[in-house]
Image (cartoon, grey):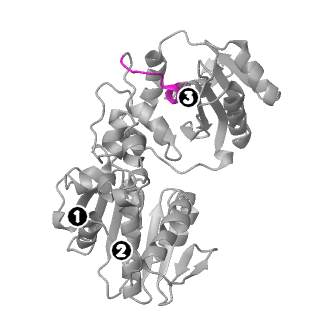
Amino acid sequence: MDGKFRKTAAQCEALALLGGPARYVLLFGGSRSGKTFILVYALLVRALRAPGSRHAILRFRANGVRQAIRLDTLPKVVRLAFPGLKFRENCSDGFLRLPNQSEIWLGGLDSAERADRILGREFATIYFNECSEIDYGAVNTALTRLAQRTALRNRAYFDCNPAGKSHWSYRLFVEKRDPVTNLPLAHPENYASMLMNPDSNRANLPEGYIEETLAGLSERQRQRFQFGAWLDDLAGALWSRAVIDCARTPLPPAHELERIVVGVDPAVTANRTSDATGIVTAARGMDGRFYVLSDASCVGTPAEWARRAVDEYRRWKADRMVGEVNNGGDLIETVVHSIDPDVSFRGVRAVRGKGARAEPVAALYEQRRVSHTGIFPELEEEMTTFVPGTVSGSPDRVDALVWAITTLLERGGERFILS
């Protein structure tokens, strides 16, 4: 069966776990540790062993599973481990059919229509790729479809870079507790997990990836992406991952969004080593809730970040762009209007500290009045590590988020207060 694929010791250990007695298995750890590769490999082995069986690979975003799995990991696994294996692709329904008539379905859980297309069927294997990005309710719904009758024992696989100890995956697989009730699991033996880190996958990584790319991250990011550590919420931070995760939601239809604002926090300097310019788009829904739509923050010259901000304004058909003018003054509006004179731009000036400005917005999150319509890793990292008065550097994405939502709190010059 295998071609040039030579399993690492960690991958061999993972395969033993995946084929062991546990029905639900989580592989967690650092970036590029081989988790996704070995899980796709294991899923293909199961599909080939049971003719006519059906298997699903799910992620929060449908385009994410296509880019990461269909166009990247899956072809690599087939080339290295199953040379000569052919499959037919059904593009309209989103599945691959193997020569033995087994099917591999790929999809996202961010859209009810896309989820229904997949979850209207039963599966022998469900693999939740990057499960730290998926709501626990969506996982439970999908698991009701782990019910196909085949020669295989039905299993669910999960992988992630650890998000934090408040995440449902930590409670379920490490603490062996129900994430909703916090009670001990009735059958903890059904849940197993394994740490996999990039150092054990060094033979398959480009030179310098660990020593340069990962070593260059902040200490907190290194703990997560290099060492696969589950992190405690930072004491004093205005946001926790649990608060952000519990309100995550699919993107509402355009007609349900009442007003859309692009918030911009321009970098003070314009060189390549300067802080990022925060560019965050948010909306107020007809339901009175607030939705974070995108994080397009970037490092660049005024012309470059202004172009990015204008692109977001056009993409979302925004009603307003707001930009902090404390450091750039009228120049900021001038640069934006040089790209598109029709942008409805308003300069805003900070008269209070970042923490004081952010606290009312953080309070809306605690009230579950703000939802992220996707996963915004850099923005959410800034949010969960922003401790007013102690932060090093500038939380540019957070500032842009705060400006956008603060503007959405206004109606006709009057502040819009949520009951």
Instruction: Give the distance between the C-alpha atoms of the residues marked 3 and 2, in whole angstroms.
Output: 40 Å
Please report contact status of discs 2 and 1: CB closer than 8 Å, yes or no. no
- Between disc 2 and disc 1, whose residue precedes? 2
Q: Which residues are magenta?
A: 390-400
Q: Is 224 placed above or below 184 here?
A: above
Please report contact status of discs 3 and 1: CB closer than 8 Å, yes or no. no
Residue ID for mark 2: 42
Instruction: Give the distance between the C-alpha atoms of the residues marked 3 and 1, in whole angstroms.
Output: 41 Å
Residue 334's label in the rendered image is: none
Please state if 362 lies on the left or on the right of 296 as rendered: left
Residue 20, quarter of picture: bottom left
| Residue 35 in the image, given as x and y percentages of width and height | 36, 61
Residue ID for mark 3: 276
The answer to whether residue 180 is seen in the rendering is no
Residue ID for mark 1: 191
| Residue 338 in the image, given as x and y percentages of width and height | 81, 25
- Between disc 3 and disc 1, whose residue precedes? 1
Residue at position x 64%, y 50% in the image: 253
Secondary structure, mark 1, is strand
Nearest the eye: 227 or 18:
227
Instruction: Give the distance between the C-alpha atoms of the residues marked 2 and 1, in whole angstroms.
Output: 17 Å
Nearest the eye: 115 or 58:
58
